[in-house]
Image (tube, rainbow, N blue to C red):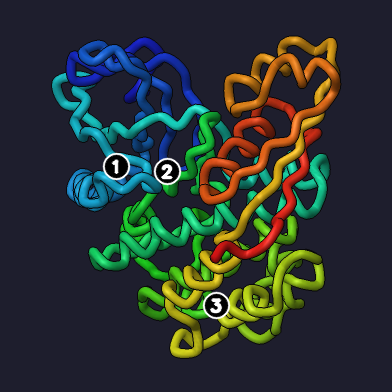
């Protein structure tokens, strides 16, 4: 029996409008909240998953509670609701309602953006993304919540320049079905820590390893180990990766070193999140200059630039506009990110100096 269909209304409120993705465990739907007139995202579970484990409802509910426990942080995808969809008299299925992020994930950003903007601009925008991911994970850890599946696919970038981390705790749901803490078909091998490959218990420092792999991919444009299994397993267990600075000219040694420390084979050797955050903050705490160039006859792009930034439409019609932001790196880098997501890639960001 198909549990969820296009057009279904869940809990007399959420109407399924489009299936965004389908995986081995479940699907993600775009839906309309008929009560508050807003677009939301809904996670559902496949029928076969419910049939093979009688604890599925409780585990899925627990994970919804974990997500709800992070409510309020600006860099965490918000869990809005949880419910049971009654398909027939004897058939029902759980669903989770989350805020919908209108934009792209970080993997798409890496694949589509790194090759089309200059290296310095990409580095500083990646710094902003890395900082926001770090804040989200740190917030969760302070609440004793582990993410368990940190990777670029679970980092979302909205068209308004906001960065959010999603899917907190859902790998615990996967573990329930595989009955193991090892890397399974539902895991992310390229970002999995040595202790996961060994089947050892998951801990806070496992998140640190996954975050290190994610940041390595973000800054360099390549995974920390580009190998097929089983060579990938051997690499995560035994090999030392090439320092990310070798592929990222603007990255300082300090940041390169801490990323390498994050992927240490033993959890005890991995740094804390505050150490990473301090380095990211130091790199971001600067004055930035952003230059934007658009075709003077491309009125659509000129309108977008004027809407996103404080640029003057009259000056842009002559071919370029330079904006200097003295204190708010969040603003200038977020604006640059918004422009890139609107296909305006002829921008250049320069760090002028460190702020005093």
Question: Is residue 102 positioned above or below 37 on the image?
Answer: below
Q: Residue at x 37, y 47 (%)?
A: 76
Q: Which of 46 and 315 is in front in this view?
A: 315
Label 3 sits on residue: 262
Q: Residue at x 55, y 68 (%)?
A: 282
Tally the numbered discs: 3
Q: Position of residue 122 (x, y in %)?
A: 72, 50
Asked where in the image residue 7 lies, by quadrant, the reply is: top left
Asked where in the image residue 96 lies, by quadrant, the reply is: top left
At label 2, counting other C-alpha atoms closer than 10 Å, the crowd grade (few under 14, some 14-19, many 20 or more) is some
Secondary element at image label 2: loop
Q: Nearer the viewer, residue 41 or 139?
A: 139
* Image side of residue 145 versus residue 105, left or right: left
Q: Are marks 2 and 3 in contact (CB under 8 Å)?
A: no
Q: Which residue is drawn at 40% across and 29% down?
A: 100
Q: Quadrant of the N terminus?
A: top left
Q: Which of marks 2 and 3 is nearer the N terminus?
A: 2
Label 2 sits on residue: 25
Q: Nearer the viewer, mark 2 or mark 3?
A: 3
Secondary element at image label 3: helix
Specify the label residue 51 is tagged with.
Answer: 1
Q: Which of marks 2 and 1 is nearer the N terminus?
A: 2
Specify the label residue 353 is tagged with.
Answer: none
Question: Is residue 36 positioned above or below 180 on the image?
Answer: above
Q: Which residue is drawn at 72% across and 68% down?
A: 251
Regarding residue 231, the answer to whether it shows in the image is no
| Residue lying furthest front | 356
Q: Where is residue 85 in the image (x, y as percent from the top left)?
A: 22, 25
Q: Distance between the residues labelled 1 and 3?
A: 39 Å
Q: Distance between the residues labelled 2 and 1?
A: 12 Å
Q: Which of 318 and 139 is in front in this view?
A: 318
């Amino acid at each position: 029996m198909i549990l969820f269909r296009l057009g279904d209304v869940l809990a007399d409120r959420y109407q399924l409008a489009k299936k965004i993705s389908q995986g081995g465990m479940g699907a993600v739907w775009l839906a309309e909240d008929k009560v508050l007139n807003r677009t939301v995202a809904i996670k559902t579970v496949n029928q076969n998953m419910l049939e093979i484990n009688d604890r599925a409802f409780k585990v899925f509910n627990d994970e919804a509670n974990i997500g709800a426990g992070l409510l309020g942080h600006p860099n965490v995808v918000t869990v809005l609701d949880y419910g049971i969809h009654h398909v027939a008299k004897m058939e029902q299925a759980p669903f989770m309602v989350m805020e919908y992020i209108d934009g792209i994930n970080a993997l798409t950003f890496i694949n589509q953006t790194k090759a089309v903007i200059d290296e310095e601009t990409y580095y500083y925008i990646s710094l902003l993304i890395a900082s926001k991911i770090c804040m989200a994970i740190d917030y969760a850890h302070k609440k004793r919540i582990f993410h368990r599946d940190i990777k670029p696919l679970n980092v979302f970038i909205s068209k308004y320049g906001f960065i959010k981390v999603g899917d907190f705790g859902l790998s615990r749901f996967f573990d329930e079905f595989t009955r193991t803490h090892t890397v399974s078909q539902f895991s992310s091998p390229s970002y999995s820590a040595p202790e996961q490959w060994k089947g050892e218990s998951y801990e806070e420092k496992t998140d640190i390893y996954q975050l290190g792999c994610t940041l390595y991919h973000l800054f360099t444009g390549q995974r920390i180990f580009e190998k097929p299994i089983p060579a990938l397993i051997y690499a995560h267990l035994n090999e030392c990766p090439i320092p990310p600075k070798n592929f990222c000219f603007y990255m300082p040694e300090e940041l390169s070193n801490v990323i390498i420390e994050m992927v240490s084979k033993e959890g005890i050797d991995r740094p804390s999140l505050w150490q990473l955050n301090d380095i990211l903050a130091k790199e971001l705490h600067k004055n930035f200059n952003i230059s934007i160039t658009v075709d003077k006859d491309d009125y659509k792009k000129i309108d977008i630039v004027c809407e996103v930034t404080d640029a003057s439409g009259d000056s842009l019609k002559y071919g370029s506009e330079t904006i200097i932001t003295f204190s708010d790196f969040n603003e200038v880098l977020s604006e640059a990110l918004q422009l890139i997501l609107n296909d305006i890639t002829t921008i250049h960001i320069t760090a002028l100096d460190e702020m005093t």
